[in-house]
Every structure is written in structure tokens, then in C-alpha cells.
């Protein structure tokens, strides 16, 4: 049986919700803007959700862990169903204001969760739309 291809993306709501390139016209979109934004803190402006300071901030000072646990539960239901039914594609998107801190962290955590829970049945692609476009160079704003 073919593996379930899963695209996990971070994006900026300023640019709009990403299109589904599979042609299925769907998938999950999680809005991280309800989580406290480390980008509002001067020392974090040029960092991303992959920097240790941001990871610690999100895990210790926000409800990101609870947010992700809820997202994992929904995604796990869908992945199990899609694998059983032979589906080939799933889109999972995490958006925040700038596509730099919260959505990057959340997308990375989701990709890690899926890879650990479904290593045989899935192929996960992690895509950070804004960060890859900027070549991960963030300037102060």
C-alpha cells in the first residue's frame, strides 16, 4: 500500500491560507494567533520557532502545548482513517501573523508527532513558506 503523503506547512495569514497542491481542495488549517506572540518581544524579533529561546518561551509561557495536544488528537483520527481507506494526501497548515514564530514551532512539532507515531505509513514534508522564502533571515521590524 502507498504511503500517505502529508504536507505540514507554516504560513503567514498576511499572505493568505496556502492552496492545496494535491487538487483535493482541503486539509486542516490551525490558527496560532490565539497563542501569545514572542515576536512582540524585542529580543525575539529576529528569531524563529526553531530557536531555543522561542521554543522555551512557547512551552513555558503560553498554551501552545495544550493547543498542539488538541491538534494531535484531530490529526490522529484523520491519519488513521486516511491510511485505512487508502488516501494518498493530507494537508496540515499552521498560520500566525508573520509565519515566523508560533506557526513554525507548531508545524515542526506536528511533523515530529506524525513521524514518531506513523513512521511506516506516512511520508511527511515540512514546508515553512515564509521562512524558506526569506532563506530564514529575519530582520527587525
Image: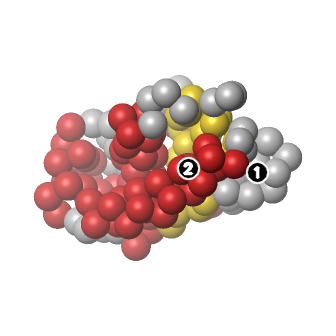
Q: Position of residue 18 (x, y in %)?
A: 70, 51
Task: Give the number of marks.
Answer: 2
- The tag on residue 79 is 2
Q: Secondary structure at mark 2?
A: helix
Decide if residue 74 is on the left or right side of residue 28.
Answer: left
Residue 118 is marked as none
Is residue 15 at all visible to an observer of this figure? Answer: no
Q: Position of residue 112 (x, y in %)?
A: 38, 37
- Residue drawn 64% across the image and 35% down it: 5
Tag 1: Cα neighbours inside 10 Å, few (<14), some, or many (≥20)? few
Name the residue furthest left: 60
Q: Residue at x 49, y 27 (%)?
A: 120
Residue shown at 23% from the left, 65% from the top: 62
Question: Residue 125 lies in what quarter of the image?
Answer: top right
Residue 64 horizontal side relative to residue 34, left or right: left
Decide if residue 90 is on the left or right side of residue 107: right
Nearer the observer, 126 or 96: 126
Image location of residue 121, percent across then percent down: 54, 32
What residue would you read off at disc 1? 19
Relative to 4, does residue 17 appear above or below in the rendering?
A: below
Residue under the image location 14 percent in, 58 percent down = 60
In this view of the protein, which residue sits in the foreground, 109 or 128? Answer: 109
How many other residues sit within 10 Å of disc 2, few (<14), some (14-19) or many (≥20)? many
Amino acid at each position: 500500500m502507498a504511503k500517505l503523503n502529508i504536507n505540514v506547512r507554516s504560513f503567514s495569514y498576511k499572505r493568505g491560507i496556502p492552496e492545496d497542491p494535491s487538487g483535493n481542495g482541503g486539509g486542516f488549517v490551525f490558527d496560532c494567533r490565539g497563542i501569545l506572540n514572542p515576536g512582540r518581544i524585542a529580543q525575539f524579533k529576529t528569531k524563529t520557532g526553531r530557536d531555543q529561546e522561542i521554543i522555551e518561551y512557547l512551552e513555558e509561557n503560553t498554551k501552545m502545548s495544550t493547543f498542539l495536544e488538541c491538534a494531535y488528537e484531530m490529526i490522529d483520527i484523520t491519519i488513521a482513517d486516511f491510511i485505512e481507506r487508502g488516501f494518498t494526501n493530507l494537508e496540515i497548515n499552521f498560520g500566525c501573523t508573520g509565519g515566523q514564530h508560533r506557526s513554525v514551532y507548531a508545524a515542526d512539532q506536528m511533523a515530529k508527532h506524525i513521524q514518531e507515531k506513523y513512521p511506516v505509513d506516512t511520508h511527511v514534508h515540512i514546508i515553512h513558506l515564509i521562512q524558506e522564502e526569506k532563506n530564514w533571515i529575519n530582520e527587525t521590524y
